[in-house]
Image: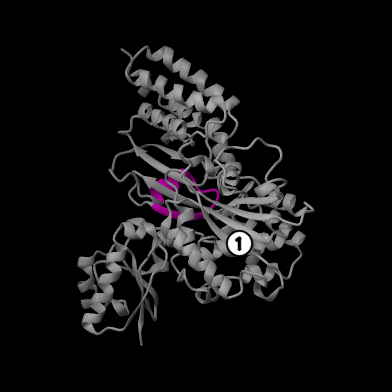
Amino acid sequence: MSTVVYVPGDAGALSLGAGEVAQAILTEAKRRGSDVTLVRNGSRGAYWLEPLVEVATAAGRVAYGPVSVADVPGLFAADFLTGGAHALALGVTDSIDWFKGQQRLTFERVGVVDPTSVADYVKHGGYRGLSRALSMSGADIVQAITASGLRGRGGAAFPTGIKWKTVLDQRTAQKYITCNADEGDSGTFADRMLMEGDPLSLIEGMTIAGIAVGATQGYIYLRAEYPHAQRALRTAIASATQARYLGNDVAGSGKRFDLEVRLGAGAYICGEETSMLESLEGKRGEVRVRPPLPAIKGLFGQPTIVNNVITLGSVPWILDHGAEAYANFGTGKSRGTLPIQLAGNIRRGGLIERAFGLTLHELLYDYGGGAATGRPIRTVQVGGPLGAYIPASQFDTAVDYEALSGIGALLGHGGIVVFDDSVDMARMARYAMEFCAIESCGKCTPCRIGSTRGVEVIERIIQGIDAERNVQLLEELCDTMVQGSLCGLGGMAPFPVQSALKYFREDFRARAK
């Protein structure tokens, strides 16, 4: 009987050598005459253990990691195909402490299923949400999403049910479902992991959205820098169509929903929903003036749902288990779970899915294990390149939308980038402002000109030229950008600069000549 061995095939694991390890396992198995079936699953998100090799045994899936090509002969010699003892043995995967403490709802199948197999997806609970949705009215589906408390996981945290109801209420012949998969925030990789490790969950979520509001066409707007996700999505869409979960007769319901992948061109601004719609229409990625909202007049002038990958990927679980079950996770107005991504100077970087409410300290030390350098963590940037820098004195803050907003920060897409006490915060402020200057679409003056002047002012501060006066000028410039910019890029770009000035002012003053 063939032994099933799992080696992740997603971009993160491949960058750490998973492809070479997979080939080495096949080569060694052939040399020894071992009957092995290799499945390229998605990473479970514990990147310090990648390449993580799992073996299906009678006791469950047993993990070994991090595995190098040189380790493979020794694993076979230790009879790892039956879960044998080895220095890299981690035990049954689900019993590893880092995984045990998580609450994986959206990511429940990532790392578990074969991403290319509809049958494996269905075997692990896939399409139960769609099956339930097909027995409900559109209004009831929208009500379930509303009652679950699901909010946009792309950063804006807008209630998903309100957006869906607005589209449902529009009386037009054509509506669209769009997924913004232009994941561009620093320290974020949850979208990529889901698309590469469980693409059918996103496809199912978009199909449910289409059934709910009466849309027959969906588009996934994917960043061009994600070739592995592109292949995974297109393979999954073809498989779902062949299995009749997409097309003109979804699951035998007589309802139609078609789905396409469209590639972006590398513009960060297209993470903003109206810029993305412009790009989808073949135009320059540039912010639209609102109103009208995309839910009323969106893609090609028609009512359009715009959600991100994690939002839509959470929908199947909600429909399968019920709105109340999802709302039971979390705290306050932040309901459900959030896939949190730990990156930067951190010992155990990766993806953790937990209900809202745990603290930054728990994430950084219980999961992350502290800084990779062993030095004290001085600050973290939460929410991407437009997120505030949070000092160590505020690490007891809960990870939820309201708690972070209360300290002048934002949760964004759930990315956390860690810095130890060797970081120069004046230079980090310059980097943040320069990022905005490069990525500005140029439509409004406060963002286009303000960010460029901001880089120049911070550079003078770094050089110690009239530092106090330039710090005051920088503060005034940031205020102008916040108040006057057309969209979130210019309006939020000052957040990291303002937080650096507020909590780490000594890094600016120390340069005065």
Up-down relation of residue 133 to residue 164 (above or below): below
Residue 306 falls left or right of residue 296? left
The residue located at (54%, 60%) in the rendering is 106
Q: Residue at x 28, y 43 (%)?
A: 374
> Residue at left 49%, top 20%?
475
Looking at this view, is 93 or 40 the one in front? 40
Q: Is residue 395 magenta?
A: no
* Coordinates of residue 267 in the picture (x, y in percent): 48, 42
- Quarter occupied by residue 293: top right
- Image quadrant holding the C terminus, namely top left
Q: Does 476 sit above or below residue 249?
A: above
Q: Tell me if residue 171 can be seen.
A: yes
Q: Which residue is mark 1?
A: 205
Foreground residue, 486 or 381?
Answer: 486
- Circle 1 crowding by C-alpha within 10 Å: few under 14, some 14–19, many from 20: many
Does residue 322 appear left or right of residue 94 in this picture? right
Measuring from the top left, give residue 477's x and y in whole percent. 51, 20
What percent of the width, then of the height, locates residue 396?
48, 40
* Element type at mark 1: helix
The amino acid sitting under disc 1 is: Gly
Residue situated in front as seen by the camera: 326 or 303 = 303
- Please state the horizontal and vertical placement of residue 330, each as a whole percent of the image: 59, 52
Residue at x 72%, y 73% (from the top left corner): 254
Give the magenta part as a residue range: 350-366
User: Does the stretch in magenta take in 355?
Assistant: yes
